[in-house]
Image (cartoon, grey):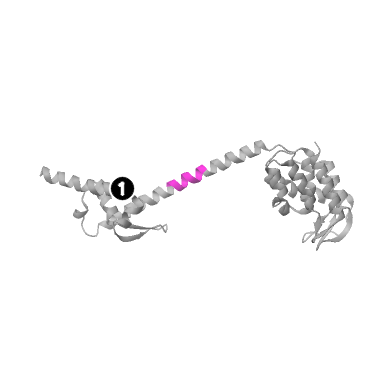
Amino acid sequence: MLLRKINKMKTGLKYFLTGMVLGLPLAGTILNSGCEKKNDSGLEDKVGQGVVARRLAEQGREYSNVQKGNEGNVADRFVQERLQKNVAENYVGKSVQESVEKENYIELVQNQNYPTDISENGVKLISEFEGFRATPYDDFGQMAIGYGHRIEDGENLTNITREQAEQLLYGDVNYVKESISENVEVSLNQNQYDALCSFTYNVGVGNFEDSTLLRKLNNGDYNGAANEFQRWNKADGEVLKGLIKRRTAEAELFREN
């Protein structure tokens, strides 16, 4: 009787050690798995006799003593346990990632030190180079009015005053400020901020966000960023004197303390 119990323990230990060495993901395949399981979540896994044997060994039972048809119950338990483990690991991993992203964002905001609004000097720079138009005009394929305001569908703008044009300008600059806030990762003084507002207002937030100017700026290369202004002096592939003058003014303002 005692000898039989010892043999049982040896057999159970053998299967237990086999499962531990081969590992859960490989045990079913290497020990010639027999059945494929799929649970409600869509998780598919191959569970073989080796895995069943390990589960039974943990309970102090032998695989050979399991009644035919009950192997699936042990296999189902394995799939459910593995699913729960994966869900837990994914939850923890996601929580850690969100925590790291939050800390990085807080650190980024703390490192940012620049104005939150354009100055009167910046508005003056934009309005001077855009020029005032009381009635709609063609701005490279899109109708505009005032100080370069692109007329949107549904806007009934046919004749406006300078005051109305300035209101439209401040509204358009909000998109520019939002783009700067979301993409600039270094400190800026007011002149640098105003220069970027004028530049982005003219070339568009998409071009600004994809620009080498922004990349160099975020790398801390302020001088390199200032040199990038002059590269944006073309319209439809043609170099324009007005853009050369504007980029020069923006670069000079950007370099001022």
Quarter placement of the N terminus: top left
Q: Quadrant of residue 38?
A: bottom left
Look at the image and tell me whether residue 60 can be seen: no
Residue lying at 71% horizontally and 54% vertically, measured from the top left:
206
Q: Quadrant of residue 257?
A: top right
Residue 156 percent location from the top left of the image: 82, 60
Q: 8 or 227: which is nearer to us?
A: 227
User: Which secondary structure class fits the magenta region best?
Assistant: helix
Q: Which residue is mark 1?
A: 21
Q: Quadrant of residue 100?
A: top right
Q: 135 or 241: which is nearer to us?
A: 241
Residue 216 percent location from the top left of the image: 70, 45
Residue 61 percent location from the top left of the image: 21, 49
Number of marks = 1
Look at the image and tell me whether residue 217 can be seen: yes
Q: Secondary structure at mark 1?
A: helix
Q: Is residue 1 magenta?
A: no
Residue 113 percent location from the top left of the image: 71, 36
Q: 162 or 189: which is nearer to us?
A: 189
Residue lying at 80% horizontally and 48% vertically, measured from the top left:
198
Residue lying at 81% horizontally and 41% vertically, measured from the top left:
119
In the displayed orientation, state which residue is furthest to the left.
1
Instruction: Give the left or right position of residue 203, taking residue 34 as reference.
Output: right
Magenta segment:
88-96
Sort mark 1 into few (<14), some (14-19) or many (20+) by Cα contacts within 10 Å. Answer: few
Amino acid at dot 1: Val
Residue lying at 80% horizontally and 50% vertically, measured from the top left:
230
